[in-house]
Image (cartoon, helix red, strand yellow):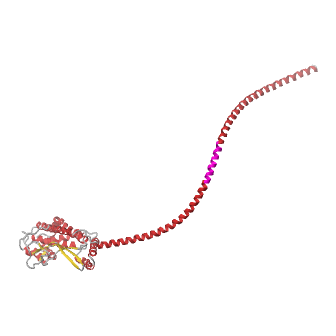
Amino acid sequence: MSSRSFSFAYGIGLVIDRYRHTQYLLGKSHDEVSTLRADASEKDVNIRDLQKSLGDASAELQILKEASAGLEWTVQRVRHELLECRNALQSTRNVNHDLELRLEAQTEATALARDEVGRIRGIHEKTVQLLKTHAEELSAAQAYLNKTDLSSGADVISMVETLNGEIFQTAATIAEAFKFGDKQVEGSTEMESAYRDVVEILGPRMTDLLRSSPHHDDQLVIQIALQAAMCAYVEWIITSWYFEGRDEEQLLSNLYNHIQGSEDQAIAGRWRALTRRYAVEAFTEGSDIHQQLVDVVMETLVNILISAGLEVATDQVSDTMAAQFAGHTSEVVKRATELNSVIGQGIISCELSPIYLPPETAFDVGTMEDTFGRGPREQELILCTTDLGLLRSERQGDDWQRRVLMRPKVALQSGLEEPAIVEDSA
């Protein structure tokens, strides 16, 4: 091959290579153009989206501008209100400052007022205590000077009559409840012991009459003896200070007699009322004083029956009496203690006292009554008291005015020696 042919062929080869390269470049450019077109299309979409977003943003911006304008107005209003609040705060601070000054001044005034109140309260308490003391002194003085009685004389008379009736019924019931045989020549040891106890109360003449008289057909002497014994005991109960023996209570009796001679009746009566009240509380605390009194009375009633010749053992008589007549005797004691309270604590204006006449007292028709209503022999002495009387005593200056409100009834031996009917005292 010639060089010209070679060169031609070489040239053709270069052309082909360039063509191929050009085709490759064209293909590549075509791909790039497709890519660019796709990118451009995508860009267009993005641009449209951006434009839409920009439109939306512009609308939002417009809204925000409008809102900003509203906010600006609000801010201005808030600033104005804030300024007003600051002014109000300053005014409040000024007021608070004034109030603090006033409070400080008021605190000082309150402290002074508190001190003054404390001083006045102290004076008030002293005044109240002084008034209380004076009121107590006045009350005590009025208590001693008050002559008002809690019961009337008529009330007391009625109570004594009721008591006498209760004594009569009890004595009559007991006397009829026991049967007596013929008198024995010699008394038993129990009878002698009972006789010694009874004679101290009824005296030897009434006790001997009780001992020697037959009782199987007529129990009148026994009834009179029982009445007299109960009268003796209830007179002591009514006048007792605190239900002890007369010897134990003698100190108070002597002291009261001295007070009566030195003080007005109102003071003496009030002293007696208070002393009776508190003496009973002090000396009988914790004891059944009522039952003790009933037992003492019942023992004497048993001794009277034994002294009268009842041929029954003392213990058996005591058991029978306790079973059948304890209630009767308890009622007598109850009424006597009620009279003790009424006369001793409820009567201030005068002295009321039961009248009991001891055996062998001379009969006085002006101050006593014959139980049997027959009248005494000349200068006859009484056997015993069967019904209590009532005496009223009142001091008038240096003298005592005494008046018998109820005459006591007494038994006379002359009345027992003749047939008689005892009046029912009930």
Furthest-left residue in this view:
418
324 over 244 or under it: above or below: above
Q: Residue visible at 61% across and 52% down?
A: 85
Q: Nearer the viewer, residue 368 or 380?
A: 368
Position of residue 170 in the picture relative to residue 91 (left or right): left
Q: Nearer the viewer, residue 417 or 178?
A: 417
> Looking at the picture, how far across and down is residue 61, in whole percent?
68, 38
Q: Main secondary structure of the magenta part?
A: helix
Position of residue 129 in the picture relative to residue 198 (left or right): right
73 over 88 or under it: above or below: above
**Residue range of the region highlighted in magenta in the rendering:** 70-87
> Looking at the picture, how far across and down is residue 331, in whole percent?
19, 66
Quadrant in which the N terminus appears: top right
Q: Nearer the viewer, residue 325 or 116?
A: 116
Q: Is residue 76 magenta?
A: yes
134 over 72 or under it: above or below: below
Kindly indicate the quadrant of the structure image that contains residue 350: bottom left
Position of residue 190 in the picture relative to residue 62 (left or right): left
Quadrant in which the C terminus appears: bottom left
Q: Residue visible at 38% across and 71% down?
A: 131
> Looking at the picture, how far across and down is residue 244, in whole percent?
24, 74
Kindly indicate the quadrant of the structure image that contains residue 67: top right
Q: Is residue 247 magenta?
A: no
